[in-house]
Amino acid sequence: MVKRLWKVEESVLVDASAKDVYAAVADLRNMGKWSPECFGVWIRGREVRAGTGFVGFNRKGFLLWFTTCRVVRAERSREFAFRVTTFGLPVALWGYRFQPEEGATRVTEYWEDLRTGPGARTAEFLGRVFTGTRPADRAEVNRAGMRTTLGRLKASLGG
């Protein structure tokens, strides 16, 4: 039996300033260009700050689902993160850290599984039904997705 991972992260060096990389990531409409699962985001207005809510539209093969999200960290040029829920149940924390490094920016994407406590089994069941991914496999699926997302982000910023 494989031990379940509750947190994963990946990073890439992007040939752009932390300010520019943060701006690209905080423009949530870009997620559909980079993520292998998220194909679109609905958000009101342009300004994104802590407390901003949005809906993510996702797909994996023929499976489609949406999540409701709320920005929990919006620290320009440093960190951007949001909590994901489905039907009011906690699912995950997704985030990005930006660290200047040798004239470029080290971007670290991280994920934490929040399907613990009351409602965890229901959230895990819904995740399996909507995404086709077993809870024990979600970390590795997300790790592969992060590599794709970060590669596309890097390519789009000229890296």
Image: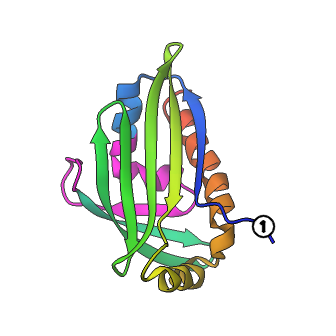
Which quarter shows the C terminus? top right
Q: State the image coordinates of residue 104 (x, y, percent, origin top left).
A: 50, 19
Find the residue positioned furthest to the front. 117
- Dot 1: few (<14), some (14–19), or many (≥20) neighbours within 10 Å? few
Q: State the image coordinates of residue 93 (x, y, percent, origin top left).
A: 44, 58
Task: Give the color scheme: rainbow, by chain, secondary structure or one colour.
Answer: rainbow
Indicate yes or no whether the magenta region holds residue 49. yes
Q: Which residue is drawn at 44% across and 48% down?
A: 95
Where 158 sits versus 148, above or below?
above
* Amino acid type at mark 1: Val
Q: State the image coordinates of residue 18 (x, y, percent, origin top left).
A: 40, 26
Where 142 sits versus 13, above or below?
below
Q: Which residue, given by chain and number where applicable, does mark 1 sit on?
A: 2
Q: Residue at x 52, y 44 (%)?
A: 109
Indicate yes or no whether the magenta region holds residue 119. no
Q: Give the range drawn in magenta.
A: 25-51
Give 111 or 53, whichever is nearer the viewer: 111
Find the residue positioned furthest to the right. 1
* Left or right of 39, for residue 136: right
Q: Which residue is drawn at 19% across and 47% down?
A: 47
* Left or right of 114, for residue 1: right
* Left or right of 146, for residue 43: left
Q: What element carries label 1?
A: loop
Where 51 sits versus 157, above or below?
below
Q: State the image coordinates of residue 115 (x, y, percent, origin top left).
A: 49, 72
Q: Which residue is drawn at 51% across and 34% down?
A: 107
Which quarter shows the N terminus? bottom right
